[in-house]
Amino acid sequence: MQVPIRTLYVALLIGALPNVCFAENVYVEGLVGSFETHGIDNQVPEPGFDFSTIGVRTGYEFNKHLAVEGELITGSEKVALESYGNYPDASVNLKSHAAVFARVSAPLNERLSMHGRVGYASLELSNTVASDAAGGYMDTHAGPAFGVGTKFNLSDKIYLRGDHTRYTSETRENRVYTIGAGVNLFQVAKVVNDLRD
């Protein structure tokens, strides 16, 4: 049985929580953005959807040039299907986008840097048919992913970041746009400890 990336990501995050604040190079980001998915199979056309999203990203920086990270994003609202046979109340939701990446960064100055990343991502869409007693179905897609972005350090603890990511499965092309704010957990924990002292 194939284990979804989303399940592995959540398990890894929970397992790392007890030690995360003691790791100097661990970061956490809150994300908002949009997710676009469109069918690419000409023989069996699939509709395209655009979702507003929220999510979280965590990672570890080996140095200022190399990091590994994972992200988990979900749709913040359902999108109505204009036509779905005899079910006019049908809607589709982005249940999850989960991904893991290796990220390479190139600092431009003390505050600004550019980065590229490659990895693997999976997508789960849930189709809810309000008039259907069966309750709809789940659609899963996955494939290699790549993206580019930029990061701006507000301080040594807090930064802003934007990313554009793409990945393609057998039948869908997916694009993820995110804007996030992140913190270095070690630096934050250090400040809290200093205040207590």
Image (spheres, grey):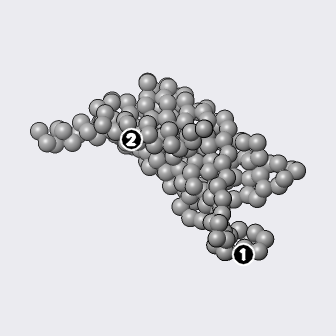
Q: Quadrant of residue 145?
A: top right
Question: What residue is shown with label 2?
Answer: 14
Name the spot of residue 89 as percent of width and height, x first.
Answer: 67, 74
Q: What quarter of the picture does the C terminus occupy?
A: top left
Q: Is residue 28 visible?
A: yes
Q: Which mark is residue 88?
A: 1
Residue 197: which disc? none
Residue under the image location 66 percent in, 41 percent down = 142
Instruction: Give residue 85's position: percent from left, percent from top.
Output: 78, 71
Residue 184, quarter of the rendered image: top left
Question: Tag 2: residue type?
Answer: Ile
- Category of crowding for the residue at label 2, using alpha-carbon neighbours closer than 10 angstroms: few (below 14), some (14–19), many (at least 20): few
Image position of 33 (left or right of 139):
left
Q: Closer to the camera, 95 or 189?
A: 95
The image position of residue 27, as x and y in percent, is: 40, 37
In three-dimensional space, the C-alpha distance between marks 1 and 2, rounded to whole angstroms, equals: 40 Å
19 or 105, which is in the foreground?
A: 19
Which residue is painted at 44% across and 40% down in the image? Answer: 11
Helix, strand or loop at label 2? It is: helix
